[in-house]
Amino acid sequence: MERTASCHCGKLVLTCTGDPAKVSLCHCFDCQRRTGSLFSVAAFFPRERVKLPVAGAKAFKRPSASGRDVSFYFCSDCGSSLWWEPDRLPHLIGVAAGAFADSGFPMPEQAVWAEHRHGWLDLPLPEHQRNPVKRAPGD
């Protein structure tokens, strides 16, 4: 199976092969600011199964709660945040689930940073108050 994700204007397009390794919803304040919503939903794919755009993306790097950096890539024209690369999990690339524009996309299997969840938002997902610490293979 091949899935295509794109930014709002269509300038950036990436292709993912196969099913995501993990789909996760994040309530952290950084994700809320990045999306302008109450949470973000990320589909994490093994790096070797993601074909990234050759040009046209801008990057923003920031530290994460784990103390390791995350680089976010967005369209220089429309500003859509399309994918990110977490230094603590270098074998995975996170892709904004909404960028697939697929109402049949798999539901998140968990919600992280639930301590930042808006109290009136109730979702049918297992929650972690913070982000469970996971390391890259071989770490």
Image (cartoon, grey):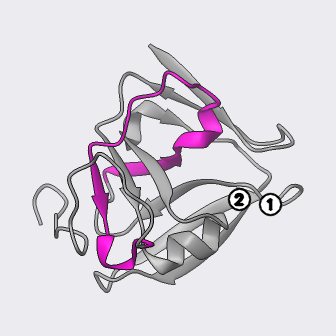
User: Is the C-beta separation of discs 1 and 2 under 8 Å?
Assistant: yes
Would you name the residue on which mark 1 appears?
A: 79
Would you name the residue on which mark 2 appears?
A: 74
Q: Nearer the viewer, residue 97 or 122?
A: 122
Q: Is residue 93 visible?
A: yes
Q: Secondary structure at mark 2?
A: strand
In the drawing, does residue 117 fall left or right of residue 67?
right
Q: Secondary structure at mark 1?
A: loop
Instruction: Please provide percent x and percent y for residue 75.
Output: 78, 55
Q: Nearer the viewer, residue 125 or 22?
A: 125
Q: Is residue 14 visible?
A: no
Depicted 29 relative to depicted 126: above or below: below
Q: Residues within 10 Å of mark 1 (few under 14, many from 20)?
A: some
Instruction: Please provide percent x and percent y for residue 115.
Output: 31, 78
Residue found 34% across the figure and 80% down from its top: 68
**Label 1 or label 2, whichever comes before in sequence order:** 2
Q: Amino acid at mark 1?
A: Gly
Res. 12 mark: none
Q: CA distance from mark 1 to mark 2?
A: 6 Å
In the drawing, does residue 59 fall left or right of residue 118?
right
Figure quadrant of the C terminus: bottom left
Residue found 36% across the figure and 69% down from its top: 87
State the extent of the magenta-drawn residues as a range: 91-118
Question: Is residue 114 located in the magenta-colored stretch of the structure?
Answer: yes
Figure quadrant of the N terminus: top left
Depicted 130 relative to depicted 4: above or below: below
Q: Amino acid at mark 2?
A: Phe
Question: Is residue 24 located in the magenta-colored stretch of the structure?
Answer: no
Depicted 76 relative to depicted 31: above or below: above
Q: Residues within 10 Å of mark 2 (few under 14, many from 20)?
A: many
Residue found 29% across the figure and 69% down from its top: 88
